[in-house]
Amino acid sequence: MMTGKQYIESLRNRNIKVYLKGKLLDPKTLSEHPYLAGHFNSAAVTYDLAHDPAAEDLMTTKSHLTGKNQPVHTHPPQRRRLGQKSQDAAHDLS
């Protein structure tokens, strides 16, 4: 599983084209843009929480494909319980 820092770095290493108000943004600095930084930082926190032993049960789930733990927000719900777990995680973070 990635950490929050690794998540932010992974965005810099992708060739993403993002236009904002008609201007093409630099993909290397997307995570620092004032309009986008809040979202990227919030997502990074969820990756970090998945590594926190106190939040691990709420913030991770076992992948049905690999059997490894992964952040609950990146895993599509396979059953109702997991969907509820995602909702619980979102509620507890707010």
Image: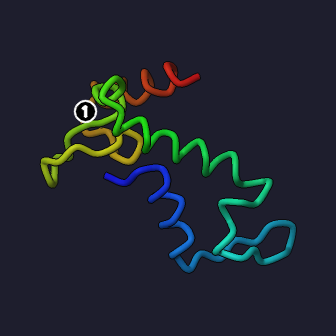
Q: Which residue, given by chain and number where applicable, does mark 1 sit on?
A: 79
Nearer the observer, 52 or 76 = 52
* Image spot of residue 83 (x, y percent): 36, 30
SS at badge 1? loop
Q: Is residue 7 above or below residue 53?
A: below
Please name the residue shown 39% across and 48% down the image: 74
Please name the residue shown 22% across and 43% down the image: 69
Res 56 quadrant in image: top left
Near mark 1 (Cα within 10 A), the count class, few <14, some 14-19 or many ≥20, is few
Q: Is residue 29 rendered to the left or right of residue 85?
A: right
What is the three-letter code of the residue carrying label 1? Arg
* Image spot of residue 15 (x, y percent): 56, 80
Please name the residue shown 34% across and 26% down the image: 58
Please name the residue shown 51% across and 20% down the image: 91
Res 61 quadrant in image: top left
Nearer the observer, 64 or 29 = 29
